[in-house]
Each structure stands twice: as structure tokens, then as C-alpha cells.
Image (cartoon, grey):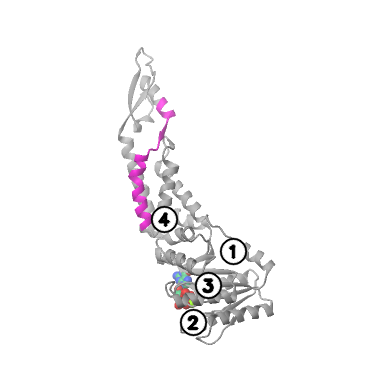
Amino acid sequence: MFKFLKNKLKSFRRKIEKVEEETAKAEIVRPVKEVRAEKGAEEEVEVKVKEVEVAKPRIGLKEKVSALVLRREIIIDEGKLDEILPELEVILLESDVAFEVVEEISSKLKERLVGRTKKIGERLSDIVLSELESIIRDILDTNRFDFDAYIKDALKQKKPLNIIFVGVNGTGKTTTIAKLAKRMMDQGYSVVLAAGDTFRAGAIEQLEEHASRLGVRLIKHKAGADPAAVIYDAIRHAESKGVDVVLADTAGRMHTKKNLIDQLEKIKRVTKPDLTIFVDESIAGNDAVERARMFNEAVGIDGSILTKLDADPKGGAAISISYITGNPVLFVGVGQGYDDLVKFDSEWLIKRIFD
Ligand SMILES: Nc1nc2c(ncn2[C@@H]2O[C@H](COP(=O)(O)OP(=O)(O)OP(=O)(O)O)[C@@H](O)[C@H]2O)c(=O)[nH]1
Ligand SMILES: [Mg+2]
């Protein structure tokens, strides 16, 4: 997971260390006021000190000067950041972080670092990477949403809850529904599935297979039927049986296909979902983020689930999708098994990128 990004960040750390080493080697001229030598020197002295030499023990005048420099802190200037930030921006772009998010990260880093003091002995690379981590954490936390708390509260108001899953073809919608059904049943909720993908050959049978493995009821019509009617029936069924949640599959579709987007609008109009969840695959990178934005504009989404993080070396989609859509990431898929669904948490992702 995120191997590419992690390796790039490692080489970024080395680059900062190199810049720092070079700066340390360069002579820094420090005017020191009224430093007088103990043994009779009377003039104000301007002392040239090599940063690298500062920590070494000295004697006499030099020792006095060192003590002054040691107490001082080095100010991180814009020039130094200009040497390293472009490389970070390239790394983030190569890792599929959306352009706007890269700009945000870069400007926040500058804002936090320029003019900041760094103690002698403190490493610039540690400071930069820990600020980067904190900025990415803030970006991930912009639209926090606790799915479990939401379900618990929402069920006090109404039952069943209707949750529909939308997205383009093959991204993992149906598998994610099965995973989430398992997760919710493990938490003690009752679930019914709606076979709302009446379009793709074999889609109903695929969901049926999951339903029978998980021991959950599936409501289906024939292939080609109106998906809004299928989901509507599933809701009626759940109402009559006192079932907590309907998880409704829909056919994969491109956001550019107007008639298919109209069909989703109809599903929403007829079945009034409590949550519309956009599912896409992390490995699609910027495309996934762009599609989330388009689906949000076209039909409105309440959150996203990113699948296939286990197969994604980059991670840029996970970093960007919530910031770009203004909606939270609810879960991430990390494998093909039923338990390979992780509730999204910024700390979880940060650990996997920075540890
Ligand atoms: N590695 C990995 N594979 C996944 C994950 N989620 C889903 N898949 C696989 O992705 C493939 C497509 O999954 P589906 O659930 O059929 O996707 P879909 O969006 O319903 O596809 P359509 O119905 O054709 O639009 C399957 O082989 C899944 O096993 C995941 O988190 N990690
Ligand atoms: Mg499907």
C-alpha cells in the first residue's frame, strides 16, 4: 500500500538533509555586538562561524562567540524552502494528489515554515515532514463523518434506512455492499439487499451469491427491470419486516451518460435515499477524484468509499477525494474478502503513508 509515495517521501527527506548539509557547510557571517575577548581585545568583532563547528567545545574568545550562536536559533527562510518545495510538489502530483490539494499543501507548508526558528541540532527534514503530515491530516479531517454514530442516530428517527451505492463500472460497488452488509450485521443490525443493477449481465446473480453466503435477504426483479422499482420494493419489504437498513446496488455508469444519470435521479426521487454513497477505486487516482466531483454535481453524494487501497502504490485519491468533493470518505476497501473494509480514519491513513 502506497509504496511509491512512501519511497518518494524517503528520497525527499534525503534531499532536505542534503540541502541542510550544504547550508551548514557554507560560512555564515554573524555580527556579534560587543563581544570582547577576555584577554584584552577591545573592538566590536564580527565573527565568522561555521554552523557545523558551532557545537564543538572551544576556549577563549571563540568559546564566548560559540555560546552566543548556540543560544540563537536559525530562521528558516523562504529561499531554503524554494529549494525543496518544488520537489515535494512533483512527488505529490506523481502520486495522484489532485492539483488543488498539492497547491493547498504547498502554500500551507510555506505559511507554517517561513520565518520559523529552528534550534541548532534540530533537523529541517524532521520539521518539514512533520508539518507535511499535520497538513495532510487536516486535509483528511476537513469533512469528518462517523458512519456508525450516524446509523445509530438515524435509526432512532426512521426505519429502514435506505443507502444507495453509485459509481462507474467495475470499481467495487457490489463487493463493498456485501462487505458493509457483513459489517452491519456483525454490529447487530438487520439488513436487506436490493439488486438495483438490473442492467449488467450477471449483476443480479453476483449480488445473490453474496446474499446467500452472508445469509441476508435479497430483493430482486428480472434483468432489465426499473431499478427504482426494485429498491422501492426492498424498502417496503424492510418496512414490513422491521429491517434496519436497505443497501441498494446500482449499475455502473459514466457520469457523462445523461440518460443513465437521469435514471439515478429517478432512483433518488422515488426511493429518497438517506445516504448516497459514491464508490470508486483508489488506483484510478485523479480520475476517481474527478468522477466523484462529477457525480456529486450530477446527482449529489453524501460520501465516498474508496476501494482497492491494497493495490494502490500512490494514495493520492485517498488524500484528495474528500477535500475536492467536500464530502467525507466513509470506508476504504483493502482487499477482496468480506472483512477487508476499514472505517476511514485520518490517523489510519497517515500511519500508512508516513510510518
Ligand atoms: N484488491 C481489491 N479488490 C477489490 C476491492 N473491492 C472490490 N474488489 C474487486 O474488484 C472487482 C470488481 O468489483 P465489483 O464489486 O464487481 O465492482 P462493481 O462496481 O460492482 O462493478 P460493476 O457492477 O460491473 O459496475 C472484483 O473482482 C472485486 O473482488 C478491494 O478493496 N481490493
Ligand atoms: Mg456491481
Q: Which residue in the structure is indicated by mark 3?
A: 165
Which amino acid, mark 3?
Phe
> Looking at the image, is 301 positioned above or below residue 30?
below
Give the distance between the C-alpha atoms of the residues marked 2 and 3, in whole angstroms.
14 Å
Q: Magenta segment: does it hold 72?
A: yes
Q: Which residue in the structure is indicated by mark 1?
A: 147
Q: What's drawn in magenta, residue-wise?
A: 68-93
- Closer to the N terminus: mark 1 or mark 3? 1
Left or right, 47 with reference to 149:
left
**For disc 2, does the CB lie below 8 Å from ligand 2?**
yes
Quadrant assignment for the N terminus = bottom left
Q: Is residue 333 visible?
A: no
Q: Which mark is residue 100?
A: 4
Which amino acid, mark 2?
Ala
Per the image, label 1 sits on a secondary structure element best described as helix
- Closer to the N terminus: mark 3 or mark 4? 4
**Do the residues under discs 4 and 2 have CB atoms within 8 angstroms?**
no
Per the image, label 4 sits on a secondary structure element best described as helix
Residue drawn at x 51%, y 56% as measured from the top left? 346
Disc 2 crowd rating (10 Å Cα; few below 14, some 14-19, many 20+) is some
**For disc 4, does the CB lie below 8 Å from ligand 1?**
no
